[in-house]
Amino acid sequence: MRSTARARTAGLTRFSGLYVLAIVVLVFWRLLRPGVWVSSQNVSVILSEASVVGLLAVAAVIPLSASLLDISFANVAGFAMGLTAYLALHTGWNTWLIGALAVAASAGFGLLSGLLVAVLELPSLIVTLGVSSVALAATQYLLDGQTLYPRARLAPSFLSLGTGQWGPIPIATFVLAGIGLAAWAWIEHTPSGRRLLALGGNANAARLAGVRSFRYQVLCLTLSATLSGIGGVVLLATIGTADDVSASGYLLPVIAAVFLGSTQIKSRFNVAGTFVGVILIQTGIHGIELKGFDQWVNYVFDGAVLIVAVIVSRRSSKYAF
Amino acid sequence: MSSKELFRLAGLSKTFGATAALRDVGLRIGQGEVHALLGHNGSGKSTLIKILAGVYQPDERTTAHTDGIPFALGDHAAAHEAGLRFVHQDLGLVDSMDTVDNLALGGHYLRRRSGFIDRPACTRRARELVESIGYRIDVTMPVGRLSAAQRTGVAIARALQDLDGRTRMLVLDEPTAAMPATEADRLFEVVAHLAEQGLGILLVTHHLDEVFRVADVATVLRDGRVVATRPVEGLTEHGLVDLMVGDQLEQAEHARHDQHALTGPECLAVDALSADAVYDVSLTLARSEIVGVAGLDGSGRVELLEAISGNRRRSGAVRIGGARVAANRPHAARRAGLGYVPADRTRNSTFADFDVTANITAAGVREYLRAGLLSARAERREAEQWIDRLGINPPDPSARVDSLSGGNQQKAVVARWLARRPAVLLMVEPTQGVDVAARESIYAAVRLAARDSGVLIASSDSEELAAICDRVLVLRRGRIAAQLRGSELTAAAIDRLCLSAVEPEAAHA
């Protein structure tokens, strides 16, 4: 009894071949580029990039727990990145203050989505699709088609968020770990997280059991955008430049990671499973980048992985979209 | 009135497994005759209609005749060929489309030579058809925005369209179940009009007043047999009810009603509540009292409980333990001490992804906080306690709830509310889709709940109400028509009052 319980928490009773796939990917890239693959530097690079993907994945998995799909996270992250860079170049304010402002402004987009979904009872997919476009427009307005290079004006402590390391582990990874842990504890181990899951499992039953769906819809979409904003700020700290496209590229891999994650550990969207998905997808992407394929290969990979991820997750659970 | 025989059927039997749904049923319908088919839930009415429509096959090959021409029962195409047309209770209309499209989808579109739809011609045809059966409807308005009677009219028009005089008999399956009285009048004018044109009409209904209003002949089914076929002239309402209910023993099934005179303080007071299908209902409920709400489908039985629970718009006052509860706010009602076990378990109450434990604790998760986090152990202890008390099987708190039988799922849902010790517990069809054994444990759970709560149960099962309730309110057309308690509280009495055609005066319970 006890051992099966433990196996369940380790995800072994829900073993779906994902781990095998991860090993295959690793071996495949290893054969292509012997020697380059498993160095500690590589691990740091993967982890560093995975941190942004991971933050956005947590942003996506929170509303998904309540059966709401937020696809604005990538463009909201791009907005936070652009706004931070813009303010750094145009004001003399403290970098951390600027970052906080950008995160707060991002949260505003989530609040807007949440209110539209909760008050007008619109489908979250459509609402966040629209809000996503507005966020992209705001970014383009700020950047005016330019790539901004605010690195020199960003505080060193802020930059170390993206490039610094404690030992072999990037600091961004610690940020992700902290936020992920908090999200996991919230969803899995608090009453409000349970209500969120109830809403995701059966919205009617949740309402009839006394869950105020309005609140939770607004809350989880606002939280999602807040974390997206944090993801965007960390991304800026990592690469030091801001443009209006680099954040958009996170859309597909993140959704793929979240769907793959829904087959892991629990038979629904969950934070811990999402991290498994993130690691797998990140190793694949990193391999492609090492090999130096053209950009279009990246797009094919992203698209194919997303579709495969949804196929895999369909087999083990059911979603409303 | 029935001059010439139009439809004849004899010796029809149907069994499902070990249950005989129909036994040697015969039916004759004359030309231009409105023939009412009456019977209680489970009397075999629906089975008969489904065999006529060709959905079910009879046990043995059985032939029916229209105009003396034989056809085999249980074959959809043969029934259509023989001129039988159906308007089922679920009308099967596409709400987002207008009458023109709904009629064309049931038949065919008129086209231009180019192959494209000739819209004006279709519209003209639809308007003529609808007017020919006596309706005036805007045929270009989406069907979903028409009234209930108009929608039924569209369904009738669809059933009667196309075919060139081959339509012989129209079967209407409870057409007024969800219709206000004034709209029903409109429908019956149409029915009379169609009968005058020589069609046979088979009208399935629960409402005895409709029988006296439109029918020429009535056939009563009970336990799968035809107990009588009689001209409506000369029948009395009382006589019809006797035929439908039979001579069941009219004695209280058990002694509980009498010994249970002692009840606690008032826990629920409903004053002049109106909602969809519910008009000016007032009632009170005391702690440790179990009160039933009976009524035919469409009587407002379910809507009343939904409105009290805050899940349906309402006017009027609801007080729990003396404190007024805001309307339309389920959460406020829950916080005021109201528990609600809705109908349709899969849709409205179980969390299929959750285990039994999380299903039981779902309405009060906050109770299981230990040091800021949910304590799996506290939740589990609660679940184990209810698994034990209600006999949930398998007794595994971490089993996914959708792996349980319907009865055991329902026990978990009931436990969810018992665990909260609500002041008032509302239950709608608490044993819907529940096997016999689980039924008894749910009744036991209801009695357990009644130690701390007042329980209000809406059910279509009169035996259930007679077995567990201290008193029963009978709703008719949205109003409380009668109240039964003590030795007068029997299943037969409930049925009798549900079926009675007398319009209720405003009664207060």
Image (cartoon, coloured by chain):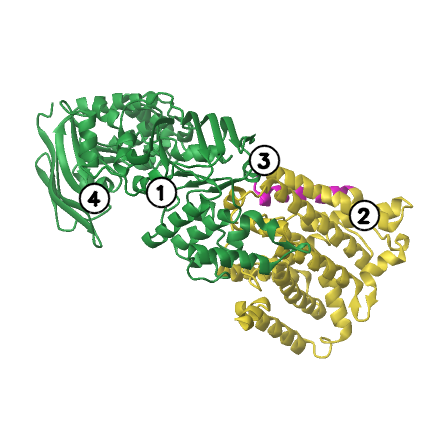
Chain colours: A yellow, B green
- Secondary structure type for disc 1: helix
| Residue annotated with mark 3 | A120
| Residue B226 pos. (x, y %) | 14, 38
Q: Chain of mark 1?
A: B
Is residue A135 within the magenta segment?
yes
Residue kind at label 2, given as amino acid type: Ala
Q: Nearer the viewer, residue A27 or B420?
A: B420
Instruction: Please name which of the two marks, 1 or 2, marks the residue nearer to the observer.
Output: 1
Residue kind at label 4, given as amino acid type: Ile
| Residue A152 pos. (x, y %) | 90, 55
| Local crowd size for mark 1, using a 10 Å CA cut-off: few (<14), some (14–19), many (≥20) | many
| Residue annotated with mark 2 | A100
- Secondary structure type for disc 2: helix
The answer for how far apart the CA atoms under marks 1 and 2 are is 62 Å
The answer for how far apart the CA atoms under marks 3 and 2 are is 30 Å
The lab-note entry on whether marks 2 and 4 share a chain reads: no
| Residue annotated with mark 4 | B51
Q: What segment carries the magenta color?
A: A120-141
- Secondary structure type for disc 3: helix
